[in-house]
Amino acid sequence: MECIFCKIAKKEIPSTLVYEDEKIVMFKDLNPIAPIHLLAVPKNHISSANEITTENSKIIAHIFEVIAKENKNLGLEDGYRIINNCGKLGGQTVEHIHFHIVGGKELSWAKL
Ligand code: 5GP
Ligand code: ZN
């Protein structure tokens, strides 16, 4: 069975899309932890940050470029945090690489 974020990227299951281009989608997280909580997801399946290679790493730069370019449109002009959870100890629950973009309030630094 194909993974949930592949299905969201293909519109096979619904999401609230806030940005899309030929390489990535950005949509609202189902369980937001802040007033703004988006997920930036490559359309190509990459399981986690551990699977980034010389061949596929351009997509990561692209995601950060889009966030920088679109930050005002996304309501993030006053600042935000980008988070990637990787693997079991990192708290990754969906095995398709994604970046959480959280903002819309002053964020305290993570207590681990
Ligand atoms: P992780 O824990 O892997 O870093 O983050 C997975 C995130 O995906 C969680 O914040 C969770 O709320 C979100 N999520 C899981 N399933 C869905 C879904 O079907 N739709 C949306 N919009 N978000 C989802
Ligand atoms: Zn996938």
Image: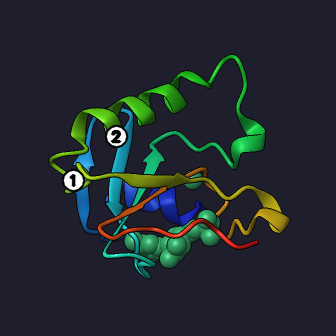
Q: Amino acid at mark 2?
A: Ile
Q: Residues within 10 Å of mark 2 (few under 14, many from 20)?
A: some
**Who's the residue at 33% across and 60% down the image?**
27
Q: Secondary structure at mark 1?
A: loop
Residue identifier under label 2: 67
**Who's the residue at 69% across and 49% down the image?**
47
Q: Secondary structure at mark 2?
A: helix
80 or 18: which is nearer to us?
80
Tell me, for residue 38, which label it has, or none: none
Asked if one can make out residue 99 in the rendered structure from this viewpoint, the answer is no
Side of 76 relative to 72 (left or right): right
Q: How is the image coloured?
A: rainbow
25 or 32: which is nearer to us?
32
Q: Amino acid at mark 1?
A: Leu
Q: Quadrant of residue 8?
A: bottom left
**Where's the N terminus, which quadrant?**
bottom right
- Residue 13 lies, with reference to residue 5, above or below; the image says below
**Who's the residue at 62% across and 25% down the image?**
56
**Dot 2 beta carbon under 8 Å from ligand 1:** no
Tell me, for residue 74, which label it has, or none: 1
Residue 31: x and y in percent read 44, 82
Question: Are discs 1 and 2 less than 8 Å apart at CB?
Answer: yes
